[in-house]
Amino acid sequence: MSSTTAAPRTPAGAPIRVVVAKPGLDGHDRGAKVVARALRDAGIEVVYTGLHQTPEQIVETAIQEDADVVGLSILSGAHLTLFRAVLDQLAARDAADIVVFGGGIIPADDVADLEAMGVAKIFTPGATTASIVDWVVARVGTPA
């Protein structure tokens, strides 16, 4: 799914809801917390799941919280496996309309593979929090 062609998922005036998650065994969450805070400060409702979440836990949270977006932070090198598992779980739960983006230490060669599997956007080191907020707002709607 192209990040520029889909219609906003969030109705006009409704708050954007984002689940920020740290899947797998990666224990470094500073970046995820910085992004979560920037989104929150922009008027977006954010649920941060904490460390060591399974793809099933992340998807369950996204569904329970009626999330528009799931943001994954992955620094462990398992990005291809973990993004695929989250996307598969979303599809299995009839929730493939939830937008998935992510960031972390992800080699440039893998970004195209992630986008081909359905990840809407990958932010690599050096991305600003403003660019992430702007992308989320443009992709799914306007914060309330």
Image (cartoon, rainbow, N blue to C red):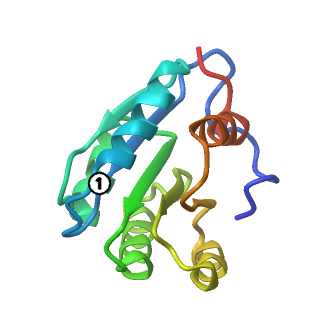
Outermost residue, right side: 5
The answer to which of 77 and 44 lies nearer the viewer is 77
Q: Secondary structure at mark 1?
A: helix
Q: Quadrant of residue 101?
A: bottom right
Q: What residue sits 75% from the left and 62% below the top?
A: 2
The answer to which of 12 and 26 lies nearer the viewer is 26
Q: Quadrant of the C terminus?
A: top right
Q: What residue sits 17% from the left and 60% below the top?
A: 52
Rendered position, 36 above or below 113? above
Q: From the viewer's perspective, is 76 left or right of 7?
A: left
Rendered position, 92 above or below 45? below
The answer to which of 11 and 111 lies nearer the viewer is 111
* Residue 112 drawn at (x, y percent): 67, 79
Rendered position, 30 above or below 114? above
Q: What residue sits 50% from the left and 73% below the top?
A: 106
Q: Which residue is mark 1?
A: 58
Outermost residue, front side: 126
Q: Quadrant of residue 133?
A: top right
Q: Quadrant of the N terminus?
A: bottom right
* Residue 30 drawn at (x, y percent): 31, 46
Q: Amino acid at mark 1?
A: Ile
The answer to which of 23 and 127 lies nearer the viewer is 127
